[in-house]
Image: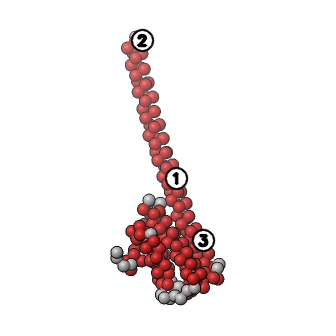
Amino acid sequence: MNIEVIGAWGELIGGVAGLFAAVGVIVTLFYLARQVSDSVGMARASHNRGLQDSWAAYNNTIATSPELARVLAALTTKDAALSAESRVQARHICYSLMNISAAAEYSWLHGQINEIEFENHRLSFDNTLRTYPGMVPFAIEILELYPGLRLLKVFASVSASMPRH
């Protein structure tokens, strides 16, 4: 064998090895893409579960407190007559509701929950205000304190009822 034949064999073997290396890189990229996809899916599910836990805690707080239940019962009328203490409780019930709802919209905007999940949160907010119309003035008060929240879709029903400045 002369040097040219040995060189040709070396090039052939090097080319085959390069081909195997390229296939290995492609297989590795597909594997990593799958791992990232699975990880994103688990993060989304975990985030959605966190929002659901927030709703559960909100509902559990009210359901296990006769005092808060009485405040909410009073809020079923539009012009609820509340004591000063009950007004504080109602305001904080509304703050909690709006915090959960805003978190749901931010999660949707950042792709952590899908549009259907967000729409369920938005409807929960609207339905709560329909059930407890006495809570609307507190929601308006909060939106006046935090005007940036008026831009959120989840609060559109309340924002639309507010006077324009």
Compute the Cα span from label 2 to label 3.
81 Å
Q: Residues within 10 Å of mark 3 (few under 14, many from 20)?
A: few
Q: Which mark is residue 1?
A: 2
Q: Is residue 28 above or below residue 149?
A: above
Relative side of 8 to 50, left or right? left
Residue at the spot x=63%, y=82% of the render?
Answer: 67
Which numbered disc, 1 or 3, marks the residue that appears first in the sequence?
Answer: 1
* Eye-nearest disc, 1 or 2: 1
Give x and y (percent) for residue 129: 48, 80
Q: The residue under label 1 is which amino acid type?
A: Ser
Which numbered disc, 2 or 3, marks the residue that appears first in the sequence?
Answer: 2
Q: The residue under label 3 is which amino acid type?
A: Ala
Q: To which quarter of the image does residue 163 belong?
A: bottom left
Q: Is residue 37 above or below residue 151?
A: above
Front residue of 75/53: it is 75
Badge 3 marks a residue whose secondary structure is helix
Badge 1 marks a residue whose secondary structure is helix
Cβ atoms under marks 1 and 2 closer than 8 Å: no
Give x and y (percent) for residue 38: 51, 53
Which numbered disc, 1 or 2, marks the residue that appears first in the sequence?
Answer: 2
Q: The residue under label 2 is which amino acid type?
A: Met
Q: Residues within 10 Å of mark 1 (few under 14, many from 20)?
A: few
Q: To which quarter of the image does residue 147 belong?
A: bottom left
Q: Which residue is mark 3?
A: 57
Front residue of 43/137: it is 137
Residue at the spot x=45%, y=33% of the render?
Answer: 21
Q: Which mark is residue 39?
A: 1
Task: Confirm whether residue 68 shows in the render.
Answer: yes
